[in-house]
Amino acid sequence: MERHDNGSAQEWGGFADAGFDETGTARATVSDDGTLTSWNEGAHRLLGHAPAQVVGRPAAELLAHPGDTATAEVRRARTQPRWHGTVTLRHRDGHEVPVRILAHRGPPQGDWLLVTAAPRAENPPTGPDDETLVLWAYAQSPCPIAIYDAGLRLRKANIEMTRVLGLSEAEMRGLRLTEIGGKLQSEELETVLHQVLATGERRDVETYLRAGGEAKEHAWSIRYVALRGNDGQVEGVCLASHDITEQYLARQRLLLLSAASERIGSTLDIDQTAQELADVCVPRLADYASVDLLERLDQEEELPSGPLTGPVRLRRAARRSIYEGSPESVVEVGKVDSYPEVSPMVECLLAERPVIHAVTDPTIAAWGALKPDRARTLHRYGIHSIMSVPIRARGTTLGVAVFARHRTPEPFTHDDALLAEEITTRAAVCVDNARRFTRERDTALALQRSLLPRSLPQPAAVEVASRYLPAGPCAGAGGDWFDVIPLSGERVALVVGDVVGHGIEAAATMGRLRTAVRTLADVDLPPDELLTHLDDLVIHLAAETGAGETTGDVGATCLYAVYDPVSHRCSLAAAGHPAPALTRPDGSVQFLPVPVGPPLGVGGLPFETMETELPENAVLALYTNGLMGGWERDVDEGRLLLADALAHPVGTLDGTCDSVLRALLPSQGVLDDVALLLARVRTLDAAHVATWDVPADPAYVARSRRDVTARLTEWGLDEAVFTTELVVSELVTNAIRHAVPPIQLRLIHDHALICEVSDASNTAPHMRRARTFDEGGRGLLLVARLSQRWGSRQTTEGKTIWSEQTLPVGLPTEFPGLT
């Protein structure tokens, strides 16, 4: 055949195979601008034009009627990928030729291919007629086909249908579908058959079953089509089936992968994640599954990367079976077993890829010889196929998943291995995440426990009880803390705070803040000043950690309260922290209106101190916000629950703590750290306190000693007289010499003996080392040696220097009047 191509023939080269009669089809290609680019011999025969006469010329010249409707339709169809229709063309000798054309658009911006059947020059082909070909096509179709009459009885079945059903057409003729199949699915299929016969509408059904002539299940897409007579009445139904097993299995694999993505990794618990892996795979992939993790998974800081060496010790983390209780499992969940190198588990770990074994493989036989109990289990339950898949994440081996089949007749395939590997890989990442989170959370909790007080002091001013609950396993350790700090003058500081965030960083920040609070409390700063210094510290911490360019990226809340049992007054200040609750002796509960300053770390805004008088035996409740909300409950509702729990105390303060937690916290665990501190206040009346005003005259030093001696004798503390006289003499002398009046001397007798001298000067005293020939300068050194502890604190009027002595053994440490 003569060719005149400009590239279009190569684009459509699939039509030019030498084994076909090229003259049977008239074919031409047309460029986008309407120019003919190729013309074959079939087109020559159809219109009489040789290729050289038309190639390169406009295709429109071949149209018999360029302006007719058909031609306009062709022009409009140029934007479509395909067009078909009838066009009248002009033969070379001038007569008109109606031609049915099928046009295809080539690659993007390519030529159009125009084809039509060309008239044959030779005699019509010999061979079977059309009707015979149709009969052959029906009988020899690769799809099973059956024809049922109006009585729903089989009339015809092709060869493939007889093969699938395992019955000849003669054996099935005249039987209903349920009688041929004899299965529950057959009844469902016959129901559809009846619907098609009644309505005449086509129906499509998918089913998965094992036909009588097949050894295993197949997925079938079955199409029911009504057969109508010349009068349009439905006279029967044609049933045609298509084997879609591969598509069905691929779809099931995708569904299993989707289920694995949704179900695996719902928690950050290692064993729960392992159980989710086993649950997903049974029964959709295997009849039995077990998940074993390396024994050292929970012991080492970091697992080694790369392949392992046998034998390997594995801990059974999860298992699942189609049978209740997983009787196929030799190892109980939580138990550790050693696996030799010949076991399929270690083989896949060494190879770092899935391995599939038939139960008859030499590896299984060698393993069974070493582990007779395993061999007996394989035989007892008829396990015939075993697949082992390594659990690896981020280059680290974590364990192995083992799958077995006994009720499913088909052995595991390569596709099953790929699917199991994909699921196991997803689970491995979840296991590794859970492992890393658990390690970090345990570290944070250990750090947090080490930073929180192991036991609270029990000062005379208050009776305290506390509770601390870390957040649930998904949240990690937080930065909540509480503290009870004894201060001078029998006063006590109560502290509760909460660092923003969770984890090691929050726990470490909490430790630094708790230490800072204790240090600032030793300086005896008022609550508002203490919070101001603490706010500066948080800002510095944020700058050190590089948390951000703005303040507030590292933050905390804190409530600081100081209670004085002598004056019965309590000073409180808050930095973004919830207000404390006060339970009065009559059972009424109120939330103290503490001015709430900004959270720590904001900077620039002042804090305010409020004072209130606490009646004897009142209970002050300090807590963090984890106690109040977060479980579909607002703060007001939480306050009501807390007030009710405090209004009905249960025996001791410890019992009340437990009652509060039961009332406010959910049973399934807390979502945020919870700290609770209860303090029942005690008071010291005038019988335990003695106060004297001291004139700024050295002559009154002796008078102060006599007053102190008389009061100690009255208290029965004669053995403390000598030491106390020396301390009082030095403190009063210093105040008279170096301070500003008024001067006041006070003795407090409780668990210890406290001597205080107050004056109007803000100058803090400093202890120094006196030289050999100095006449003075040894007063504070003497006070320090005679006292258990001593110090000074600033007051609104000036300062107070105090000294605390431990009472000698045998002396009374309290009086019946102490409440």
Image: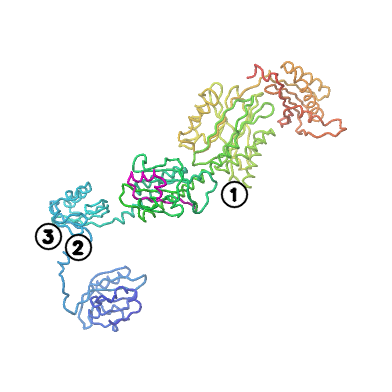
The stretch drawn in magenta includes residue 381: yes
Identity of the amino acid at label 2?
Gln
Q: CA distance from mark 1 to mark 3?
A: 84 Å
Give residue 102's position: percent from left, percent from top: 26, 71
User: Foreground residue, 753 or 170?
Assistant: 170
Q: Which residues are magenta?
A: 366-394
Residue 46's quadrant in the figure? bottom left
Residue at horizontal 73 percent and vertical 23 percent from the top? 746
Instruction: Report the disc number at residue 548.
Output: 1
Disc 2 secondary structure class: loop
Would you say the residues marked 2 and 3 are in contact, meaning their CB atoms lie under 8 Å apart?
no
Instruction: Report the disc number at residue 230.
Output: 3
> Which residue carries the number 2 mark?
140
Q: Which residue sits furthest front? A: 369
Q: CA distance from mark 2 to mark 3?
A: 26 Å
Residue at horizontal 19 percent and vertical 63 percent from the top? 140
Identity of the amino acid at label 1?
Gly
Number of numbered discs visible in the structure rendering: 3
Callout 2: few (<14), some (14-19), or many (20+) C-alpha neighbours within 10 Å? some
User: Visible in this render: residue 234?
Assistant: no
